[in-house]
Image: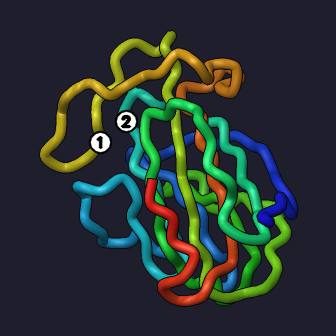
Amino acid sequence: MSRLLDFHETTVSPSYRIFGLVDTSIDTYAPHGDRSQWLLSAPGMVYLQVPPQVIRASVRLESWSTVPPPDDEEWSGTEEVEVELPGGDLALETIDGGQKEIPLILPSSGLYRMRWRWIFSPAGGAFTSPLAGMREPLLVPLRNEEKLNGADQYCLIQIWRTTAGADIVEE
C-alpha cells in the first residue's frame, strides 16, 4: 500500500517559460529535450514547460513510498518521467531566480519516477501551449481552482522510488 511520506508547498515564478525540479548535488543546465513534450529531463533534473501567460505557479511536491493512488481530478495536463537523483536533495530552479531548496524528504538517492499534473487559472483567460509546433488554447478545468491560491498555475509533483522499468502506471 502506498503512503505519503512527506510534502512541501511553495510558489515559483517561471522564467523563459520553464521551471524545474533539480538534485542539488549536480551541476544544472537547461536540458536539451524534445520541446514538443511538456517535461524536459536529464539525470538529476526535470523541467516543466509552461505557457507564456504563467507569471506565478503554486507547487505541491509529494514524496511517496510507492506509486501514488490514482485520483479522479480533472487536470490540464499529466506527464510522467523517470529520473536519477544521485544526491536526493531537491531544489526548484528557474533560469532567472536560481535554486530554491526544498525540504522534501526522499527515502534515498537513486532512480525515481515523477508524476507532474497541472491546471491553469480560469481567471487568467486563454492559455496557449508552450510546446514546439502547438499554438492552440489549452484545457482549463473548473474543478480545482481552490488549489491555485491566486496563482496562474497549480502543479502537483508526486515522486516515488523505483527500479529501472518498474512501477510505471499508465493513465
Give the percent coordinates (x, y) of residue 36.
Answer: 23, 55
Q: Is residue 42 above or below residue 75?
A: below
Q: Is residue 169 above or below residue 38?
A: below
Q: Secondary structure at mark 2?
A: loop
- State the quadrant of the N terminus: bottom right
Left of 82 or right of it: where is 12?
right
Asked whether the beta carbons under mark 2 and mark 1 sit within 8 Å of each other, the answer is: yes
**In the picture, residue 126 is in which quadrant?**
top left
Left of 137 or right of it: where is 14?
right
Q: Amino acid at mark 1?
A: Pro
Task: Name the residue that disc number 2 marks.
Answer: 51
Give the percent coordinates (x, y) of residue 154.
Answer: 60, 34
**In the picture, residue 170 is in which quadrant?**
bottom left
Q: Secondary structure at mark 1?
A: loop
Left of 59 or right of it: where is 73?
left
Q: Amino acid at mark 2?
A: Pro
- Residue 111 visible from this viewpoint: yes
Task: Name the residue that disc number 1 marks.
Answer: 130
